[in-house]
């Protein structure tokens, strides 16, 4: 009996899915609510967000409307633009993938939202310094 090997998600599909997740979480929207808006189950939204299932162009346009961003938002920093030859005028300097990965987590999003509510710029700078000191101790 032959077993089917699981195919790894395409890096671009995975990136687009993580950007959908990040934006959905930024809006405080559940997978179920997004799925309902699209006529899909939350399981399908999970598959999109993990990159397991590819999001078609018309579906991505619907998602961008619901999540109130342009379609290009989902491709910012996409790995395919970094790995393939550059097409003049089509790509900007990509944001590091670790930033997107961090913002796609609940902790990353909560930390970013809380940090942005701090109005005192000197205090924000001191918090960054503190975190950098803590992180440098972990490297030892």
Image (tube, rainbow, N blue to C red):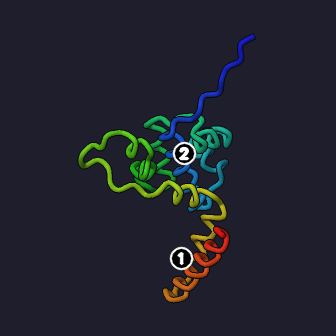
Q: CA distance from mark 2 to mark 1?
A: 25 Å
> The C terminus lies in which quarter of the figure?
bottom right
Vertical arrangement, residue 123 with respect to residue 48, above or below: below
**In this rendering, is residue 26 above or below 132?**
above
Q: Residue furthest right?
A: 1
Tell me what residue is drawn at x 62 percent, y 72 percent. Answer: 135
75 vs 93: above or below? above
Residue 108, given in percent of the width and then of the height, sits at 61, 64
Label 1 SS? helix
- Residue visible at 43% across and 52% down? 77
- Judged from this view, the residue extending furthest toward the left is 88
Query: Which residue is denoted by mark 2 in the rendering?
Result: 17
x 44%, y 45%: residue: 79
x then y, percent, for residue 71: 41, 48
Farthest residue to the front: give it: 140
The mark found on residue 116 in the picture is: 1
Q: Nearer the viewer, residue 30 or 1?
A: 1
| Structural crowding at the residue carrying mark 1, measured as other residues with C-alpha within 10 Å and reported as few (<14), some (14–19) or many (≥20) | few
Q: Please give left or right for residue 83 compared with residue 11 in the image.
A: left
Residue 16 at x, y = what percent? 50, 45
Tell me the quadrant of the picture where the N terminus can be found.
top right
Q: Residue 97 got which mark?
A: none
Residue 67 vs residue 55, the one in the foreground:
55
Secondary structure of the residue carrying tag 2 is helix
From the viewer's side, name the closer residue of 139 and 37: 139
Crowdedness of circle 2 by 10 Å Cα count: few (<14), some, many (20+)? Answer: many
Residue 23 in sight here: no
């Amino acid at each position: 009996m032959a077993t089917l090997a699981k195919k790894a998600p395409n890096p671009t599909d995975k990136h687009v899915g993580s950007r959908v997740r990040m934006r959905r979480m930024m809006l405080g929207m559940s997978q179920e609510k997004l799925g309902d808006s699209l006529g899909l189950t939350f399981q399908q939204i999970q598959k999109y967000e993990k990159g397991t299932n590819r999001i078609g162009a018309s579906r991505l346009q619907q998602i961008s409307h619901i999540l109130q961003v342009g379609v290009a938002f989902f491709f910012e920093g996409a790995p395919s633009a970094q790995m393939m030859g550059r097409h003049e005028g089509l790509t900007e300097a990509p944001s590091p993938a670790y930033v997107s990965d961090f913002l796609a987590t609940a902790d990353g999003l909560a930390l970013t939202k809380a940090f942005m509510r701090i109005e005192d710029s000197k205090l924000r700078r001191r918090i960054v310094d503190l975190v950098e000191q803590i992180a440098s101790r972990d490297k030892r």
